[in-house]
Amino acid sequence: MVTGRGAISLGSGHLIAGHSGSSFTFDGLVSGTGYLWKVGAGTGTLTASNTYSGTTGIESGTLIVNGSQPGSDVLILASGTLGGSGTVGAITAEGRVAP
């Protein structure tokens, strides 16, 4: 589970978060050229000014972006929802956008 205020450096790799279906909040910085993929039924919340440039994918559940990550485009699959008051890159949505 991803929680807390630390920093995650993706490098050119990836982070898949939410497998357990639990909700999480991450207040720390996410950086690198890799991607972040949200899975599971829970809600994930990102609050920092993230600098990673890979895609943010939402396979299922909800991802709340209350920070800024304008360098990361978002792909929302049919069972996913994007919400929050933050800034993201371009959005491609099969699922829901619910700010």
Image (tube, rainbow, N blue to C red):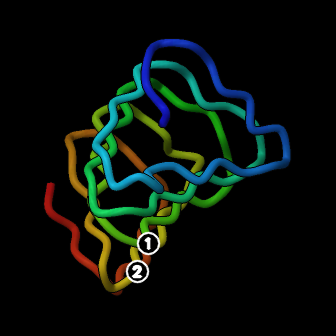
What residue sits 74% from the left and 29% below the top? 9
How far from the left and from the top, in percent, is residue 42? 27, 53
What residue sits 41% from the left and 52% below the top? 20
Identity, as a three-letter code, of the amino acid under mark 2: Leu
Q: Secondary structure at mark 1?
A: strand
How far from the left and from the top, in percent, is residue 69? 49, 40
Q: Are marks 2 and 1 in contact (CB under 8 Å)?
A: yes
Q: Which mark is residue 77?
A: 2
Q: Residues within 10 Å of mark 2 (few under 14, many from 20)?
A: some
Query: Looking at the image, which residue sits at the far front?
Result: 20
Q: Secondary structure at mark 2?
A: strand
How far from the left and from the top, in percent, is residue 4? 43, 17
Which quarter of the figure is the C terminus placed in? bottom left
Numbered disc total: 2
What residue sits 36% from the left and 43% below the top? 87
Which comes before the other along the chain, label 2 or label 1? 1
The answer to which of 37 and 47 lies nearer the viewer is: 37
What's the distance in space between the residues labelled 2 and 1, CA to CA? 5 Å
The answer to which quarter of the image holds residue 93 is bottom left
The answer to which quarter of the image holds residue 95 is bottom left
Identity, as a three-letter code, of the amino acid under mark 1: Glu
Q: Which residue is mark 1?
A: 59
